[in-house]
Image (tube, rainbow, N blue to C red):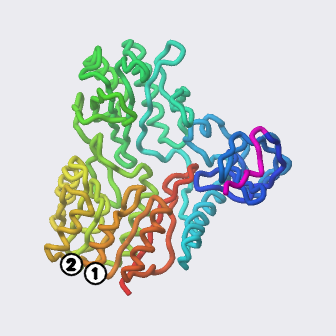
């Protein structure tokens, strides 16, 4: 029997915000029926207007505030909320850290898993931290613009200050934008699938200050390409690499499969935990280097290595965790599905004179099963999966290998909880507290390190 929602569209109500969702929206309950309200914080009393009603929940917008949270930050730029760049900027930073700790604790509690969650490790300056930007290029009011899309749409809002990005990257994007205008390079048009330039991607080394500019084009060549490249490296002395990426498909995927170096080298270098890494245009590299060092150091410390262990690093990327572990282990095996990442990982092992690492291109779950069949017996398995978490087959293979410890670096608490429950069924227990690390200040995302030990 379908129950009727206790609210109707356009109805005005007085509510008190009870909580925040994992996306950072305020939650108010009307007869146990949840309403989600943007820009509302726990404890605030406000008048809202219902905008949408589904069978089990609804959405509303804030009309007027009767009381405001002491954690509310005034003078925020609403552009950052409209674009989803900084959905939590209206929440004071200490309260953001508590929210992230609470988010993990709540999910474990709902799954009836008893666990301690330590306070979130935050940043001294929780802005201007991103070392990589991917900004769309579109024509707005007759002029080529760079910026960010309004949430849930493809309307570009022109922006020059992205708030959470390295300011040198923001400045570089404006320089490139101005040169694209000067050379009259047509911006890509999604509707007609015409035009040339789709996206500008910039990477900058936190320690090295080397900068890479990637021009993502619909066409194999950009008009006035040689002059444009020449002007970019003259205008931006930090640039050591200019790359063309060709994406001719009508798609939302940012980059295509063809990458050509137009100036300098195909990679930039940066360091992490005292190791040097070559980073190419399409390889994954954590976007918050300061917090990544804390996150990885935590994973290494919790692995408790003495120099005698065999370690597997599933989802190794360009070898960032693998090589940091190799300094403290006997042998490390890394696997990743992206061929370019493994190429980079091998180069990075040579760069850092580490010969006790082996890298394979494969899906983590199939390579784990193969290693298990080959009789490789790891003492520690480190996993740092994407948001969808671990495949069940990978958890099974890991348990069959029987490592003493599994160190789980997670970027999604929901899949972490699901995977931990599976590990518990296979004879592993959580050891110590889960440690959240704030890799993405001003957003609801949270990373964490969990240690599982064999019973």
Camera-nearest residue between 222 and 35: 35
| Residue at the spot 55% in from the left edge and 47% down from the top edge | 127
Q: Magenta segment range?
A: 1-10
* Residue 328, x across and y down, in percent: 27, 73
Disc 2 designates what residue?
Answer: 377
Residue found at x 18% / y 55%: 346
Q: Are marks 2 and 1 in contact (CB under 8 Å)?
A: yes
The answer to whether residue 70 is visible is no
Residue ID for mark 1: 402
Ranked by sequence position, the earlier of labels 2 and 1 is 2
User: Could you tell whether 25 is left or right of 210 in the image?
Assistant: right
- Please, what secondary structure does the residue beneath circle 2 have? loop
Q: Is residue 283 above or below residue 32?
A: above
Q: Is residue 340 left or right of residue 205?
A: left
Disc 1 element:
loop
Question: x%, y% of residue 140?
Answer: 52, 18
Q: Is residue 300 left or right of residue 112?
A: left
Rendered position, 183 above or below 454:
above
Point 40% across, 34% down: residue: 252
């Amino acid at each position: 029997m379908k129950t009727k929602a206790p609210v109707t569209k356009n109805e005005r109500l007085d509510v008190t915000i009870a909580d925040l969702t994992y996306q950072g929206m305020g939650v108010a309950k009307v007869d146990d029926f949840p309403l989600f309200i943007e820009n509302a914080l726990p404890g605030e009393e406000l008048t809202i207007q219902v905008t949408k009603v589904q069978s089990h929940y609804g959405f509303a917008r804030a009309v007027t505030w009767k009381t405001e949270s002491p954690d509310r930050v005034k003078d925020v730029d609403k552009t950052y909320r409209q674009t989803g760049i900084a959905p939590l900027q209206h929440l004071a930073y200490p309260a953001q850290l508590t929210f992230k700790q609470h988010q993990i604790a709540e999910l474990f509690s709902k799954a009836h898993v008893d666990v301690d969650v330590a306070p979130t490790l935050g940043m001294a300056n929780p802005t201007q931290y991103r070392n990589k930007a991917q900004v769309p290029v579109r024509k707005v009011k007759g002029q080529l613009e760079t910026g960010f899309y309004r949430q849930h749409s493809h309307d570009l809002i022109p922006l020059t200050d992205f708030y959470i990005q390295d300011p040198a990257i923001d400045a570089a994007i404006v320089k490139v934008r101005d040169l694209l205008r000067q050379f009259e390079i047509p911006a890509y048009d999604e509707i007609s699938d015409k035009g040339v330039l789709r996206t500008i991607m910039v990477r900058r080394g936190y320690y090295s200050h080397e900068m890479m500019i990637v021009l993502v084009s619909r066409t194999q060549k950009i008009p006035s390409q040689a002059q444009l490249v020449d002007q970019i490296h003259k205008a931006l002395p930090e640039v050591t690499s200019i790359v063309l990426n060709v994406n001719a498909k009508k798609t939302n995927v940012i980059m295509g499969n063809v990458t050509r170096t137009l100036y300098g080298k195909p990679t930039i270098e940066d360091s992490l935990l005292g190791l040097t890494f070559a980073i190419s245009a399409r390889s994954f590299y954590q976007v918050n280097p300061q917090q990544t060092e804390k996150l990885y150091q935590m994973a290494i410390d919790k692995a408790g290595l003495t120099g005698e262990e065999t370690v597997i690093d599933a989802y190794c990327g360009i070898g960032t965790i693998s090589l940091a572990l190799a300094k403290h282990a006997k042998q490390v095996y890394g696997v990743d599905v992206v061929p370019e990442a493994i190429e980079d990982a091998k180069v990075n092992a040579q760069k850092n004179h580490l010969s006790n690492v082996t890298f394979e291109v494969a899906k983590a779950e199939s390579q784990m099963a193969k290693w298990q069949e080959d009789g490789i017996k790891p003492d520690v398995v480190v996993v740092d999966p994407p948001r969808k978490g671990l495949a069940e087959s990978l958890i099974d293979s890991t348990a069959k290998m029987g490592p003493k410890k599994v160190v789980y670096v997670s970027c999604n608490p929901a899949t972490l909880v699901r995977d931990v429950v599976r590990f518990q069924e296979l004879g592993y227990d959580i050891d110590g507290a889960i440690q959240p690390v704030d890799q993405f200040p001003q957003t609801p995302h949270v990373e964490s390190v969990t240690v599982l030990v064999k019973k």
